[in-house]
Amino acid sequence: MTEQISVTRAFDAPRELVWRVVTSREHFAEWFGTDAVEVPLDTLVWEPSVGARWTAQMRLPDASIKHWLGEFVAIEPPERFVFSLTDNPDEPDVLAPVAIELAEVEGDEGRPRTRLSLTQPTPGWPEEGRAALVGGYNSFFDTMARIIERVR
């Protein structure tokens, strides 16, 4: 059984721009929310610093609210960003680490391109749960691509 998921996407943008989209508060609220849900900025505490906690509320289409809690684990601009998360803040000892690595790759006609690789451990997760998680991260990346195009 697979013990982690991995998702990779390439963006037609310099690594520093992708880093900003991944790590900035305003952009995180947008890509973590995707088009389907909302993460209002007034509910988001997101100040990346190793050891600091972050929190957010996610407003779902059915009007329910999901609460998120996590911690910043590693911050190595513009290459590596690791944060943990849980949608069950009542159990903060069960935080899942999410590792994001950014690598410069050559794009068409020598233009800058960035490969974003994300991994998250999923010990004991059923196959359907891992597939849903991968689908969710792909939705995040779709939203990131739109943000990158808008802010280029």
Image (spheres, helix red, strand yellow):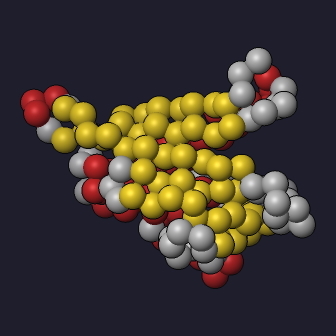
Q: Which residue is drawn at 67% across and 31% down?
A: 4
Residue drawn at 26 percent across, 40 percent down? 104
Q: Is residue 68 above or below residue 13?
A: below
Q: Where is residue 137 in the image (x, y as percent from the top left)?
A: 60, 41
Tell me which residue sits at (54%, 32%) in the image: 7
Residue 120 seen in the current view: yes
Q: Is residue 99 above or below residue 16?
A: above
Q: Where is residue 79 in the image (x, y as percent from the top left)?
A: 36, 50
Q: Can you say whether 112 is above or below 63 in the image?
A: above
Along the horizontal axis of the image, is 147 left or right of 112? right
Where is the C terminus found, in terms of image quarters?
Answer: bottom left
Looking at the image, which residue is at 64% across and 31% down? 5
Position of residue 37 in the picture relative to residue 128 (left or right): left
- Residue found at the very far top of the displayed protein: 1
Q: Quadrant of residue 73?
A: bottom right
Residue 11 in sight from this viewpoint: no
Q: Which of 30 and 84 is in front in this view?
A: 84
Left or right of 89, for residue 139: left
